[in-house]
Image (spheres, rainbow, N blue to C red):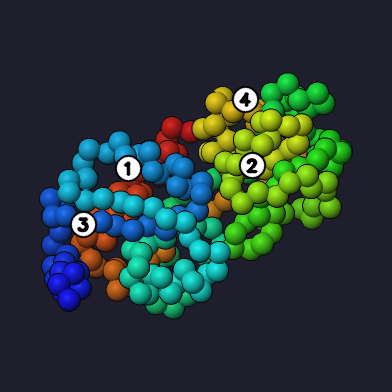
Amino acid sequence: MNPALQQIEMGLSNVHSFDIQSKRTFHVLVNEPMMQLLQPLVEADTSLGNCEICFGLTPPQEDDLFSILSLQKADLAIDVGIYPTAGYHQQACYSDHIVAICRKGHPRIDKQLTQEQYYAEKHITLKIRRSELYAADYFTEDTISQRQISCECESLLSMMTMVSESNCLGVAAGSLAEKYAEKLGLNILALPFTVKPISQKMVWHNRHNKSQAHIWVRNKLLDYLSQIENEQ
């Protein structure tokens, strides 16, 4: 019973006041690009006091995500494709874009990518976990025809690594492509389609709206995302 009582006491005390020197772990669910961008900033932050921010992957199904937040198994989530739901607050927090990637030294593609080249090459793909659509289909306004799929990956970073070791094309979040392009030997190319922004949203249960602890961690995450945008 003691851990549960401590959790209740901590929750009640943090509604009106919050001290970063009090030990507290915040659990944040994010998608893979957000985890890759945010985790290094958290590790390098010396102003957290005795607080920790731990990340986990958002579940594929939206209902499961809201259930986790409702049961307080996570404090908040950041993801794309989350739709408004009663009882939860949402806030746009970061905008990204998709790009095409290929390995440096690709025999047919250098600095530009045409639609003809896009369809002529094989692709290593990644599905958006919540929609079951490929990223290129989800984040473009155009209808993309069937392409040659060489491999389908679960991880964005795994897909980028495989693209760097083949003549296949991939589609990635621009921020992540820029972060790893030099390390992996990748060229970043504009997609030959009309692309839509990757709109990341922060979502949490309404019970946390006025919690000082929750306001603190939300502001921390917003500060990190602002740093990333300013560096781009």
- Circle 3 crowding by C-alpha within 10 Å: few under 14, some 14–19, many from 20: some
Is 85 positioned to the left or the right of 25 in the image? Answer: right
Q: Residue at x 47, y 48 (%)?
A: 34
Q: Label 3 belongs to which residue? A: 24
Q: Label 1 belongs to which residue? A: 42
Which is nearer the N-term, disc 4 or disc 2?
2
Q: Residue at x 58, y 35 (%)?
A: 177
- Image spot of residue 25 (x, y percent): 25, 56
**Residue 19 found in image quarter:** bottom left
Which is nearer the N-term, disc 4 or disc 3?
3
Q: Label 2 belongs to which residue? A: 159
Q: Is 210 drawn above or below residue 232 in the view shown? A: below
Quarter of the rendering occupied by the N terminus:
bottom left
Residue 111 numbered tag: none
Which is nearer the N-term, disc 3 or disc 1?
3
Q: Label 4 belongs to which residue? A: 185
Which is nearer the N-term, disc 4 or disc 1?
1
